[in-house]
Amino acid sequence: MSAAYATFGLAPAMRAGEVLADGGYQVHRDFVDFIVDGRPLLFQLSDLDAVSPLASDVPPAIFTAQVRSLLLEAEAPLPGGRYVIYGCPECADLACGAVTAVIDRADDDYVWRDFAWQTEEQADLELNGYHGIGPFRFHGEEYRAALNSLLNGDANGSRRRVLLIGARVALLAKLAAALRTIGIGADITRDADDVPADELRGYGAVVFGRGVGEEERAAVRRAFERAGVDVACVDGLAPIVPLLVAQIEHALDRSPVEQRRLTRLVAADGEAGVEITSACRVRLTAYRIDRLARAHTHELFDGLLEAGRHRIALDAKAVKGESFVVARTAGSVLVEAMAH
């Protein structure tokens, strides 16, 4: 099968972190995804919780080596000229499984072919090959320009730190600890007036507790404006750490909206409406505060959905009173208050 020409590009992407109800967690990873014919290549594979080798948290020397490897300026890391395209977001161990492909030169062009799911040194194309994916032939000039932009520092950098502002110090301390556990830096303050501009430029989001007044919020926004920072502002919905983590994950998402899997969430009258752009696993979780200000967590839905819009009936007890719904895929998070 000859390779058909395809367009090649890069875009920021995210593997969303999460704090689980049982005390476990899932780490946050920012990475650069491959955009083939205008769509993330990851979405064209089966529903995978994976990241590309171009992750923002790897040391600069390793990141550069990964880019040069994709440019075929270094030996292939796996036998048969195979390269890791997507790997485990937790440990990057081949034993956990990885999507690999052969990368060849064809005159001035680059060809990605023979995609496979691989857990050992040798790939079994007959058993584990992605037979409907590729081969893709990329124009050499376009391919090299995209990857060299990463070496030239032109890629969108991630700011994986958040500033927490609120009156409930104990809650903020728990939230900061949870964020650090999943790989997001967090600092606590009451205002931002005394924070140097260089430090403010390192934050991707600022989170306001429910007790922070509008004057205080406006002052913080002005401080970021003076520093020339376009920062995402998060109004904390409720004093529930996993819910606040979900809000922050959504705020830190720098991927283009049109290239996200989860694009819409509506929660009203005992139903959730979700819209996804490609088949994937979707999870819905409800967080509720009862009359005694106690927090409750309810898992509402966990299943594979096809691309399109879906309406999902919710457990009435789980979403009564003051409640919130979180929708998750591997790379996207949306949060909505339940409307009654």
Image (cartoon, rainbow, N blue to C red):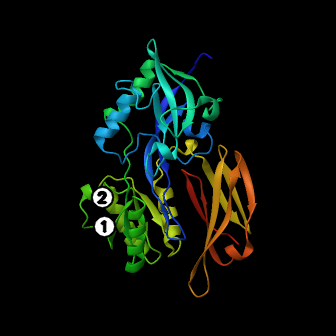
Identify the residue shown where x is 45% and y is 57%. 27
Residue reaching furthest to the bottom: 292
Q: Which of 266 and 40 is in front in this view?
A: 40
Q: In this view, does 4 lie to the left or right of 235?
A: right
Tell me if residue 168 can be seen: no
Within the image, what quadrant is residue 141 found in? top left
Expressed as whole percent of the image width and height from the top left, the position of residue 322 reads 62, 77
Q: The disc labelled 2 sits on which kind of residue?
A: Leu
Q: Nearer the viewer, residue 116 or 305?
A: 116
Within the image, what quadrant is residue 199 found in? bottom left
Identify the residue shown where x is 53% and y is 25%. 7
When the figure is inspected, residue 209 is found, relative to residue 229, above or below; the finding is below
Crowding near the residue tagged with mark 1, few <14, some 14–19, many ≥20 C-alpha atoms within 10 Å: many
Within the image, what quadrant is residue 297 found in? bottom right
**Residue 192 circle label:** 1
In terms of sequence position, does the residue under pointer 1 or pointer 2 come before the other? 1
Q: Do the residues labelled 1 and 2 touch (CB within 8 Å)?
A: yes
**Residue 200 circle label:** 2
Residue reaching furthest to the top: 107
Q: Which quadrant does the N terminus fall into?
A: top right
Expressed as whole percent of the image width and height from the top left, the position of residue 221 reads 37, 62
